[in-house]
Amino acid sequence: MKLAAERLAKRFAGGVEALADVSIELAEGEFVSIVGPSGCGKSTLLALLAGLLEPSAGRIALDGADSPGGLLGRVGYMPQRDLLMEWRTTLANATLGLELAGVARAAARERALAEVGRFGLAGFENRRPSALSGGMRQRAALLRTFLAGRDVLLLDEPFGALDALTREAMREWLLGVWESDRKTILLVTHDVEEAVFLSDRVYVMSGRPGRIRTEVEVSLARPRALELTSSPEFAQLKARLLAPLREEARAALGAP
Amino acid sequence: MSTTGTRLALALGGRLEPRPRAAIGRRRAIAARVLPPLVAGVVLLAIWQAYVALSGVHEGTFPSPLEVARALVRDRSLLLSSAWTTLSEILLGYGVAIVVGLALAIAVSSSRLAERAIYPWLVVSQMIPIPAIAPVVVLWTGFDIRPKLIVIALVTFFPIAVNTIDGLRATDSELVGLLRTLGAGRWEILRIARLPTALPYVFSGLRVSAAFAVIAAVFAEWVGSTSGLGVLILDYGNQAATADVFAAVVVLAVIGVALFAAVGIAERLAVPWWQAQE
């Protein structure tokens, strides 16, 4: 297994239990999504895996080796907000990981410039982030994550703030990027369609405290195109994911 | 966001909100900025002149603007050499304050413990009445430039330090988290994220301090000095040369405004993104 978490739990100071007993596994090059109702601890789970938070219990292993000290700096992490720095150009934001890894400025620029076309940022290399559209900002943040060169990427609702059409286009684009690089990706989303379209496997989480409720294998053939979303198989998979999520939503409202 | 320092900066005419770039008519934009204060000033001077002329007040008690202008011309060489003395005190003292203020701010925001240990003493330093401490400083150092530097720096480092501390604190904690996942250590986080975040705040503090620096310089000279505009004001005052006192005050005001403007220009150069943002 590329990345494995076993019986992870997180209880915050103050007693809020965010996660209870979460076990997940990602094989090398696999695209896995986690869907769950809002507030179920999805983002907490990613922060634990990224090493930004310490689990209250449980183990995390990368490449089969336990890492008691956490995975800080060893996996790529993209938070919900793009966090582009206005005092840097788009390119200088994208090369942040390389800069911190000690790569020379010229070499870092060169590597980033080789990717700007694929990430749809050509012509905007030297503009400030405020000059970019919402979709471009997310692609710039993704470029920053990809260039940092980790082989496991944790993406926290990367398209959450985008409009529906841009979201769709970004999904197809991300799939293209993943198919050529084959990084191991764990994507957190609340959008079932997004999860089915992109993933090999989808975990469904329960409401707080978050647990893994079910796991659904997505056996749709690759490469996938947007037309796939209107096929009956796609609808069936969506329904399988939505059923437990709807139960969770009802439970959260206190209905029988 | 709204701290004592920033509120003071606002009161002194500093602006915290980003400035929209004048797209059309740069010259017109400058005129729009320069003309109103100029017209207001001329009107004020006219009223002043009219009052002195019509009320029959003694010119030695309350000089007219024209009388002050004559004094400016008459005393020009002494005013210039004194201005040079005072300006160099201000620039050096202000420079010391910037270095000390920034260093203290970085130290205070480096850890919770450092903040608890240092911050209260920064506040205490502002409780020291300058008239009480200044003669003592002169006793320690003598009548050279050092007591002036100490007094000016003591007065002006505080707004710089407090604003910088606020700025360093304003750093997005998620951004700090992201940098950590990219392998950044505390110095790299300071350089890449915290200092750039703090820069606009630093300039707020610098603008407040620029205004204080002039007053502090006059004060420092009063306590122990043989030259400078502050000394000149005292001498003229003792001779009841009121118009000449006003002339020296005018020169001081010019220094203060110039310093304030210089900080503004430096800010535009150092923080271009602050104005570019919508």
Image: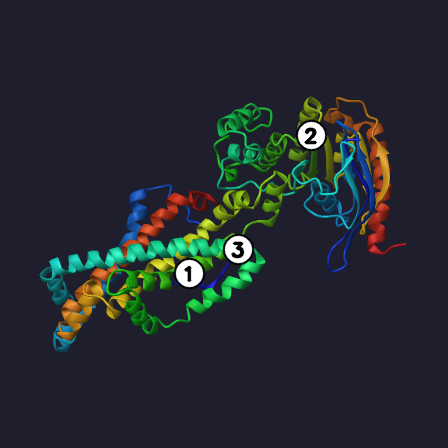
Q: Residues within 10 Å of mark 1 (few under 14, many from 20)?
A: many
Residue tagged 2: A151
The location of residue B240, given as percent across then percent down, is: 14, 75
Image point 61% across, 38% down: which residue? B182
Callout 2: residue from which chain? Answer: A
Q: Identify the image quadrant of residue A201.
A: top right
Task: Tell which circle, 1 or 3, labels the residue nearer the N-terminal end.
Answer: 3
Can you tell which mark lies on residue B73?
none
Question: How far apart are the alpha carbons under marks 1 and 3?
Answer: 15 Å
Query: Can you say whether B214 is above or below A138 in the image?
Result: below
Q: CA distance from mark 3 to mark 2?
A: 35 Å
What's the amino acid at mark 2? Asp
Q: Which residue is mark 1?
A: B159
On the picture, is A62 further left or further right than B252? right
Do residues under tags 3 and 2 come within 8 Å of each other at their CB atoms? no
Q: Residue furthest front?
A: B140
Mark 2 neighbour class, 10 Å CA radius: few under 14, some 14 to 19, many 20 or more: some
